Amino acid sequence: MNETREHILKVAFNLFLLKSYKEVTMAELVEKTGMSKGAFYHYFKSKEQLFLEALKHCMSSITPDFSIFDKNSLYEFYHQYAVYQNRILNSLQLYGDDLDRGLTVNYYSLVFDALKVFPSLREKLLEHEQNELKAWKGVISTARKNGEIRSFMNDEQIAKVFIYTNDGIAIRISLMKDCSEDASDTLLELWDSFYMELKG
Amino acid sequence: MNETREHILKVAFNLFLLKSYKEVTMAELVEKTGMSKGAFYHYFKSKEQLFLEALKHCMSSITPDFSIFDKNSLYEFYHQYAVYQNRILNSLQLYGDDLDRGLTVNYYSLVFDALKVFPSLREKLLEHEQNELKAWKGVISTARKNGEIRSFMNDEQIAKVFIYTNDGIAIRISLMKDCSEDASDTLLELWDSFYMELKG
DNA sequence: TCATACATACCGACCGGTCGGTATATACTT
DNA sequence: AAGTATATACCGACCGGTCGGTATGTATGA
């Protein structure tokens, strides 16, 4: 819609990925956008409203659309998933000098933070959580029927290994910022390895 | 050492587990401790110093001592690990009314937060990370030699599955606060299941 | 065509309140 | 008396947010 508004939102989105709600001050936001305080409050009711909008933007941009993945092959599914996720991560490119100061993009921090400001977010997260689990279970179930894999683990447990290891790696990227290229590499190596185990 | 000092530290520790550094205010701290501002600054140089001490307390109380676990059996190792971890989690009992307001103990938030205030913490975390990985790899290597497990996955990848799934579950506990008893149950179920897979 | 009227976009000084921190007074212990 | 422990009054910096004002259209009517 409005260009200036979009600009403010974009800058804010990036800031909130780097710092917490409290840490991002209006002064900083005004400085980084190059706009004035008056301009900001012309477009947004409050800092909190801005945070909410930035959050929605984040959630929608980061939530994978499982329907676009190949559901007939577990191998294809998790590879497409990894590629998709990596592409999203790279699209969160950051301009500004904040990167120098040791700050890292941290999706988890943002979510934790947002939960304090908007407790109702928890249900959304739970829902997304269950959708993801269901998608994985479906693919795994099919893969087992197809004979693609055979395993002692049940579908849900296999799904959880995929999902939880993904979190573990994502957290380490946020914590250690030795991200670079090996982000999705590490993930795929681990998943490939686990997949081979499932094939038996 | 000093009783009052210990008391302040304990209250602060619990607060920092629930809220971020910025969110915990001196006023709140003074109120929750039942002490006065003067008393506080008699024992601590600044809020930041308190945070640092609380953080050290947290790190040392939460870092597992791998040497006490049975290293001759992977099965024993991860079971002891889970029990140990569950015991630590339960020891972080929380007094106060903050629980009602939807706040959850969040170790990851604390660490992320601490990294901003004390960037040097990153090396400590990396070191701990490598220690943990080494401990797991050692046990897994032994288990493979003993014939306890046989798997296509290499030692490191197996270790990572254990470690990362643990993170995934821990994060979900923090996020969803449906913690209750199934905390370590979910973990052990998943690990047991994966272990069976490794046995083949 | 040009004066008027009104709306939108934007500015930055300023406000009340809260922050972490300090100065100082007081009570207790030895 | 002197040192320690605790309480209270207070400070300046900074916070999110407001407000009066300006610059720039843009539609209208004579």
Image (cartoon, coloured by chain):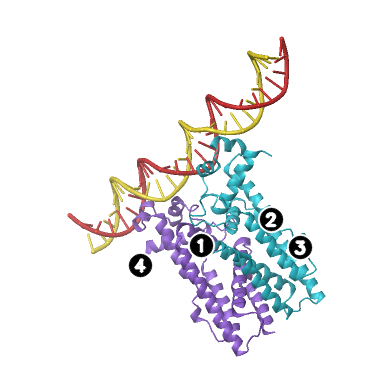
Chain colours: A cyan, B purple, C yellow, D red
Report the chain holding disc 1.
B
Q: What kind of element bears circle 4?
A: loop
Return the residue nearer the eye: B94 or A195.
A195
- What distance separates the C-alpha of mark 2 from that of mark 1? 25 Å
Task: Please indicate whether residue B145 sits to the left or right of residue B114 in the image.
Answer: right
Task: Please indicate whether residue A5 sits to the left or right of residue B88 in the image.
Answer: right
State the residue position of label 2.
A124
Co-location on one chain, circles 1 and 4:
yes
Quarter of the rendering occupied by the C terminus of chain A: bottom right
Sequence-earlier tag: 1 or 4: 4
Give percent across and percent down for residue B191.
64, 76
Disc ID at residue B111: 1
- Relative to B61, is B17 above or below? above
State the residue position of label 3.
A69
- The three-letter amino acid code for the residue at tag 3 is Phe
Callout 4 crowding tier (Cα within 10 Å): few <14, some 14–19, many ≥20: few
Give percent across and percent down for residue C30.
23, 64
Give percent across and percent down for residue B20.
51, 56
Co-location on one chain, circles 1 and 3:
no
- The three-letter amino acid code for the residue at tag 1 is Val
Return the residue nearer the eye: A94 or B194.
A94
The answer to whether residue B180 shows anywhere in this view is no
Report the chain holding disc 2.
A
Disc ID at residue B1: 4
Q: Nearer the viewer, mark 3 or mark 2?
A: 3
